[in-house]
Image: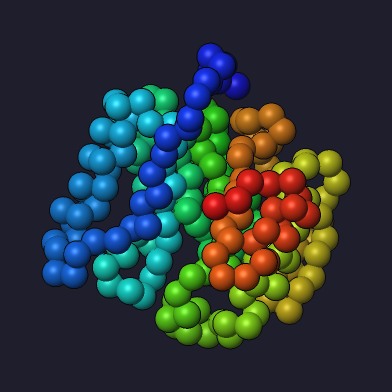
């Protein structure tokens, strides 16, 4: 695990939603996002959170994990997190696997930000009813936390995912696991999920 000197004072970071002006060249916009993260690392920023969206047109990043992996190769110290991974859009076993891999690839600089999904248009395209998003986030987070314990195989069945004696094929690089935070904006669900598992809040 990476050993860091004790940090004193405020922690500085950025939340990269990722908003871009309508009409901007998307290739250049993503390239500028990468340049920004590299610059923030050089300035001594502590963390960057990268969002996931699928339908707005001006929020271009569909996979925070891809940006985290690429940014990790261009930076040295800044921690890189998803802000957020919309859990109802992904099987929780695969989310856990991807972030454990990122934890190793970044040598402990990856962070998982979880949420139900902020844009109803994203959920609509995936045929997910908005009223199911927060309960599904809770179910997925329960599954992820059980997997990250790396103790017993996890068997779990809901109305939208199932795991049979599932276990991660790789333990996290960070001990006991990478930092995890839950988004809380319009309802108490995020705070409740964070409190239930002792996690941070975005």
Q: Quadrant of residue 188?
A: bottom right
Q: How many marks?
A: 0
Q: Is residue 70 above or below residue 83?
A: above
Residue 165, image x and y in percent?
Answer: 81, 56
Q: Kindly give the residue lying farthest to the right in the view shown.
A: 152
Q: Nearer the viewer, residue 101 or 178?
A: 178
* Location of residue 187 in the rendering, given as x and y in whole percent from the top left corner: 62, 70
Percent from the top left, x then y, of residue 46?
A: 44, 31
| 150, above or below 2, in the image | below
| Residue under the point 36% across and 26% down | 44
Instruction: Determine the image quadrant of residue 176.
Output: top right
Report the residue at 14% width, 61% height from top: 25
Residue furthest front in the image:
9
Residue occupying image coordinates x 83% and y 50%: 153
Looking at the image, residue 28 sits to the left or right of residue 152; the answer is left
In front here: 83 or 97?
Answer: 83
**Does the image show residue 144?**
no
Can residue 199 be seen here?
yes
Above or below 123: residue 34 = above
Picture quarter with the N terminus: top right
Residue 130 located left or right of residue 51: right
Is residue 191 or residue 10 the one in the foreground? Answer: 10
């Amino acid at each position: 695990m990476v050993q860091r000197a004790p940090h004193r004072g405020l922690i500085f970071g950025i939340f990269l939603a990722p908003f871009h002006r309508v009409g901007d060249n998307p290739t250049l916009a993503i390239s500028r996002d990468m340049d920004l993260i590299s610059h923030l690392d050089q300035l001594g920023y502590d963390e960057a959170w990268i969002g996931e969206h699928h339908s707005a047109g001006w929020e271009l990043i569909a996979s925070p994990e891809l940006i985290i992996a690429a940014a990790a190769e261009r930076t040295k110290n800044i921690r890189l997190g998803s802000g957020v991974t919309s859990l109802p859009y992904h099987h929780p076993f695969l989310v856990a696997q991807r972030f454990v891999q990122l934890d190793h690839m970044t040598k402990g600089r990856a962070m998982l930000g979880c949420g139900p999904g902020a844009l109803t248009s994203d959920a609509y395209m995936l045929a997910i009813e908005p009223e199911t998003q927060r309960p599904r986030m809770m179910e997925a987070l329960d599954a992820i936390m059980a997997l990250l314990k790396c103790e017993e195989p996890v068997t779990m069945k809901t109305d939208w995912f199932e795991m049979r004696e599932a276990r991660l094929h790789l333990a996290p690089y960070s001990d006991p696991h990478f930092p995890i935070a839950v988004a809380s904006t319009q309802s108490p669900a995020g705070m409740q999920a964070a409190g239930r598992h002792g996690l941070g809040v975005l």
